[in-house]
Amino acid sequence: QGLPPGLIFTPGSNTITGVSLKYSNTSIPSGNTVGNTSTETSFASSYTIPANTLAVGDVIRIKLWGTFGTGSGSPTLKNKIKLGNTTIIDAGSLPLDNNISSDHGWLADISIIVQSAGSAGAIDAQSYYKFDDDDNDNDSLFIGANTSIYTIDTTVDQTITIPVKWSSSNVSNTITLR
């Protein structure tokens, strides 16, 4: 009782069905570190949603985490999530502290809700980002509150990509998706 549509709880077995993990990185692919560039660059990891597999009410959860570091000069990092050629999350330019060692963590939690399927399908996308950008427990939190519904053709393959862009080139400006 109280489960989202599509989930089934089996009493006595303590299991919930209707949920599945579709993709997981088991290693850090070459290309999953973006650094020393101010050009928008996508991480090497991506996932393609096969055509005609999304239905009304489906929820796609994307959880990302890794490490980052910064140089001097008040760096900012622009984070996006793309579905095909459509940017569905644009977190803007996130300000980060200067001179952060490259062993600090970051995470992102993205939810995509399918509102309609078909050649003019509709999705809603929301995000949350957290960067451990100093040693004083003053993490940077960013909530990407989207107010738009995006039109996505669910009858064709749609690839999820994660592009990032540093405000300036600096050998210490690095972000790794683990």
Image (cartoon, rainbow, N blue to C red):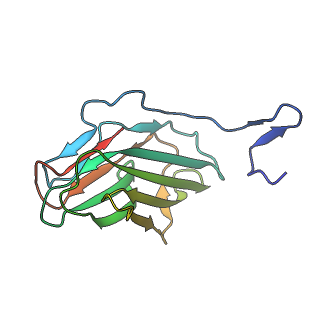
Rendered location of residue 105, percent (x, y): 36, 49
Specify whether 147 is left or right of 33. Answer: right
Specify whether 165 is left or right of 87. Answer: left
In front of the other: 21 or 15: 15
- Residue at 84% across, 31% down: 13
- Residue at 47% across, 32% down: 24
- Residue at 89% across, 33% down: 12
Rendered location of residue 84, percent (x, y): 38, 47
In front of the other: 159 or 118: 159
In front of the other: 76 or 72: 72
- Position of the C terminus, as image quadrant, is top left
Image: 98 above or below 21: below
Rendered location of residue 36, percent (x, y): 13, 48
Q: Using the rendered view, name the quadrant where residue 134 is placed.
A: bottom left
- Residue at 47% across, 41% down: 156
Find the residue positioned furthest to the top.
Answer: 26
Rendered location of residue 115, percent (x, y): 61, 58
Specify whether 61 is left or right of 35. Answer: right
Find the residue positioned furthest to the right.
Answer: 12
Specify whether 70 is left or right of 48. Answer: left
Q: Using the rendered view, name the quadrant where residue 42 is placed.
A: top left
Find the residue positioned furthest to the front.
Answer: 136
Looking at the rendered structure, the number of numbered marks drawn on it comes to: 0
